[in-house]
Amino acid sequence: MISQFFILSSKGDPLIYKDFRGDSGGRDVAELFYRKLTGLPGDESPVVMHHDDRHFIHIRHSGLYLVATTSENISPFSLLELLSRLATLLGDYCGSLGEATISRNVALVYELLDEVLDYGYVQTTSTEVLRNFIQTEAVVSKPFSLFDLSSVGLFGAETQQSKVAPSSAASRPVLSSRSDQSQKNEVFLDVVERLSVLIASNGSLLKVDVQGEIRLKSEEKAGLFLLSYGPGIRVDEVSFHSSVFLDEFESHRILRLQPPQGELTVMRYQLSDDLPSPLPFRLFPSVQWDRGGGGRLCMGCGFPGTDCSLLPCSQALNVRLHLPLPRGVVSLSQELSSPEQKAELGEGALRWDLPRVQGGSQLSGLFQMDVPGLPGPPGQGPSASAPLGLGPASLSFELPRHTCSGLQVRFLRLTFRPCGNANPHKWVRHLSHSDAYVIRI
Amino acid sequence: MPYLGSEDVVKELKKALCNPHIQADRLRYRSVIQRVIRMSKLDQWGQAEVLNFLLRYQPRSEEELFDILNLLDSFLKSSSPGVVMGATKLFLILAKKFPHVQTDVLMQVKGPLLAACSSESRELCFAALCHVRQILHSLPGHFSSHYKKFFCSYSEPHYIKLQKVEVLCELVNDENVQQVLEELRGYCTDVSADFAQAAILAIGGIARTYTDQCMQILTELLGLRQEHITTVVVQTFRDLAWLCPQCTEAVCQALPGCEENIQDSEGKQALIWLLGVHGTRIPNAPYVLEDFIENVKSETFPAVKMELLTAVLRLFLSRPAECQDMLGRLLHYCIEEEKDMAVRDRGLFYYRLLLAGISEAKQILCSPKSDPSLRLLEDQAERPVNSWALDFNTLVPVYGKARWATIAKCQGVEHHGPELPNTAAFPTSGSLIPEENKERVQELPDSGALMLIPNHQLTAECFEKTWLSLKVAHQQVFPWQGAVHPDTLQMALQVVNIQTIAMSRAGTQPWKAYLTAQDDTGCLFLTELLLEPANLQMQISVKQSEARTETLKSFISVLETVIGTIGDIKS
């Protein structure tokens, strides 16, 4: 199975290195990997690389490289699943996965690796089983800095508006504090959806895709839960974790499960082509281009708001528009409709940041660009068609308390509690965010 | 042994797979296997391991096969992609005689594969895309209705976009061709030149079946006058003109004007080739070529010069009046002033060819060509699932067949179980599949007691010393006809780990050979083979360093089998 496993920082510094089979032949395998990765020709995929009679497989997670080497022809799916599972486990134990947290918890990481993999074979990745063997405590730095935490499931400082758990709580190391039994037991249920949309230049919708996950995170073994979501939700594909009982799913959409400690993806679903709610963002660009001179780009961004029948007052947060510009654009002048927005030119593209957009609002920005000597399409005079290089606009945003598929958790009930545990506090959050929202000009 | 959930499972598996007594009893074997499959306490890693082990199992009857497939059905719906893919592979291999079952399974796995293709994890996405391509080789229509899932997203890494473009090219059918082409057309003007070129090549691929629409798009792209686009479009035109003669007309109409925008070697070669071969249909072909000839001194790429020579000569043969002058100048330059020897040689060759006569030159350069559409049909023939089923869920589709071949060559050949019929002699550890060709070889007595070590080395002196010190333990004669082929015999013996110390050349009389082998306890077997001139028999004398009749008997039987088979083959 696996010969070596190592973790590199984004610059290639080895943070963790574990040799399971001793067949590295004395070479610095981590160094070899990084050199090969950076020297790879553009059309080859870095996911699986081959050098010298071993295969290197890696994933990138939170800026780190988690790499496994093997000399056998094994299943890529199993190996990638193992690497992802390791990333989740390390995140669970150390609080979050990052260069700083790994460096602080080296002993814990090695202990985990020892228990999970024996001579390169996977023993177990179940947090319940591992809990019995891991002795080392996680080292966390206090106070939590919100800038360290970049995983989805956290969203701005909305604490005063609704009963949302403070963001830091969700990323405390879930599995560490053995001694601290008096800590309040908390259970987090996240419904996270990724929205992928492609809109053509004439405004028609080419593709829409929603990938959703229901994740349950609990710090202690909390007992038996009942989870249900509202009826009438249509999804194309759904898959459940193997520990979920589905006897009442067909009739009442009720799932029964006994979550282990740590994070568990209860359900994964997928929906395409027919969303119950309208698309969150619309773009209204109007381009005026002068051949050989400059151009004016007037962009309107409409946020018609989401279907607010269940929850009041929709908002989009951290909206960022990325628009590649034709080569040679040197300067940009702008007029934006509200002061908290920001637009700047960087790396050949326009970045327009709107930190907060209210539902039903329309925002506009007027940008004037100078491009000396632009080779536009052959023609004379100002043309209204987009010049070459004015790329598709991509939007990234978060929609808190909203799910594009309409799936809302009706209740999360604890039916059986192991005695001695306090009643856990339950936090339910819904979040949609953009995966790839592309609008062609 | 991998940990499979509990000690019991491990024990059961060991019993099933390593104990010959259980293997001999089909009923017991089958019940053990079924018990293993039913183990519900396994986690996803254990399940994946079990599925991997079961690849070696060959069900004896159709009933048993479907029994096992029913049991495995639940694995196909697992939430772990490793388990789902492992189960799919097992299905494909077990059901290799039932193509409709294989198609069924591939239908069931469509959902999980598509989910993996849109996964958050880029790496999983990539692995899934490679497998989708693998499936499309056999079932081109399989994913056609889900073409939208393979549209490229702006933020994806380059390698994923390339794979998606390839997939789009392969799943085109009548219903989705319009949308797919529109999408690819959008990619052709992408900022990244590599990606744009890949999209154009994909359109070229689709053009073999949907010629008109693609030709229209390609012609439009030429109108943009972008260097990196024009060069790839012209290369695509060259391929299409060769493979689809029906688009030649459209190609010829689109060509004029391209020459201004091409600067790189590949593009120029493609353009020059087109002008040479189809110059009769392009009015200004001689003048474009003349431009190239004017600048041939400053041309840096020898490949372009070679193409130029051939093209101008071809055009001369069809439009002599316009090309005579420039052909002369070009030949003069190539022969007198050109420094690259290959170009010079070609120039000389063409000059001498022309000296021989116009009709001779026409015969060589304009003779009938092979029908390219035949090769096209062969390329596009769907490959049966069984040709790649073994590679499914391994690293082979992720690397691609071409790269895997180079890797395998570096690593040396990997043996997947016995491949030669004569290898029944030494214990085949780990292979339970009864090969069909094993039936040809006679059933051997249980040789589990004898294990000859490979790569056993013995010097000639050592052999001689040991030979002289031992007494003959066994001697027998073997019927033989004709002469011996030493090489064949040596190779066959090597396969069963018997090394040759010395062997007479073929045809010498009397013919002798000395062989040596060592088993895992260190016991040496020294053998002399002797073929007298007039005899129809080969005499075998065996000396053993330790007196053990059991192992001696086994060794003799191995030797007999090999020699017998060689004798059979020969006669």
Image: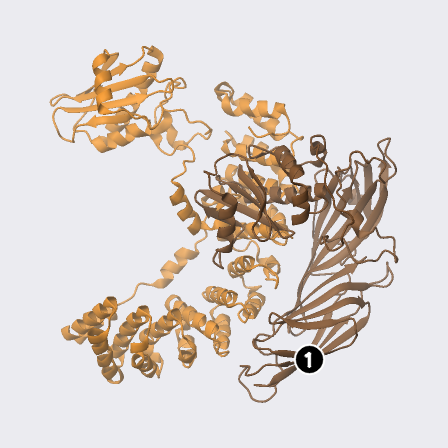
Tell me, yes or no, if residue B373 can be seen here.
yes
What colouring does the structure picture have?
by chain
Q: Residue at x 40, y 67 (%)?
A: B239
Q: Chain of mark 1?
A: A
Quadrant of image for the C terminus of chain A: bottom right
Q: Nearer the viewer, residue A14 or B112?
A: A14
Residue B162 percent coordinates (x, y): 52, 60
Tell me, yes or no, if residue A407 can be seen here.
no
Secondary structure of the residue carrying numbered label 1: strand
The quarter holding residue B327 reads bottom left
Residue B76 percent coordinates (x, y): 62, 41
**Which residue is labeled 1 in the image?**
A333
Q: Which chain is orange?
A: B
| Rendered view: A400 above or below B187 | above
Q: Is residue B30 left or right of residue B419?
A: right
How many numbered discs, if any? 1
Q: Residue furthest bottom?
A: A381
Residue A172 percent coordinates (x, y): 77, 45
Drawn colour of chain A? brown
Q: Residue at x 53, y 70 (%)?
A: B188
